[in-house]
Amino acid sequence: MPLPKIQHPIFSAEIPSTKKQIQFRPFTAREEKVLLIAKQGEDEAEIMGAIKQVINNCVVTDGFDIDKLTIFDLEYLFIMIRIKSVSDIVKVSYRDHSDDKIYDFDIDLNKVKMEWPSTKPPTISVGEGMAMDMKWPTADLYTDTQLLASEGPDALIKLVGKCIAKIYAGNQTYDPAMYSSDEVTAFIEDIDSKAFDEVRKFFDEMPRLLYVIEYTNSKGEARRIELSALTDFFQFQ
């Protein structure tokens, strides 16, 4: 006689970028193991890849494609799944650079909010009669070996290339996905400084998680800590 199959509760969450509802189960010992192995490697890309795998395992909605999530969707869903799987409270510690003391805080994950500096990706003019539609970075970038192997300016150029949805020149429309990475890179490297500043602004104004810690240190100095990424919230223990 086979062992009984464990039935898990099912919960719902809203994907921030699309407002669509998905259903998920809590993560289990299987997913805890994935996170633990990634944590032991101490590589941020490996940890984010593990988070992607955990979410993909836990979401039970038909047709769910994790690679089409934005990065901030991915981070938000992990928090929602973690709340139902472990606890809505996370303990974190930070060393104050002024008095060199360590301060402990309890973060209520229910109070982590999505901040929307910009509500949709922009269209950026890159020359007379030319423009490009941007798109938010997607979760597939966490497992993009070419991007992960890049550093410095090369990494930025490749990231920009992954975030261009369409290019317009006069009456013509171009899909960067139909061109080689070298062709897309050459196009980006030809963008003038003013337009590239708009590209940087696009990344600066991406939607993000936000939780603010305010406290006073032992010297009576007011402190403010903004947490805005999963690695700010979790040690993945």
Image (spheres, rainbow, N blue to C red):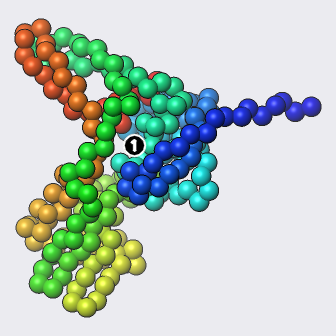
Quadrant in the picture for residue 221:
top left
The residue identified by callout 1 is: 75
Q: Position of residue 237 (x, y in %)?
A: 46, 24
Q: Of residues 185 and 231, which is closer to you in this image?
A: 231
Give the residue at the far bottom of this rendering. 171
Q: Residue at x 17, y 18 (%)?
A: 215
Image position of 219 (left or right of 17): left
Determine whether 97 is above or below 39 in the image: above
Q: Of residues 21 and 89, which is closer to you in this image?
A: 21
Image position of 31 (left or right of 191): right
Q: Position of residue 9 (x, y in %)?
A: 63, 35
Give the residue at the far top of this rendering. 218
**For the N terminus, which image quadrant?**
top right
Q: Residue at x 25, y 82 (%)?
A: 168
Q: Position of residue 204 (x, y in %)?
A: 19, 51
Determine whether 114 is above or below 140 in the image: above
Instruction: Decide if residue 158 is in sight here.
Output: no
Q: Amino acid at mark 1?
A: Glu
Q: Residue at x 34, y 75 (%)?
A: 176
Q: Position of residue 40 (x, y in %)?
A: 46, 28
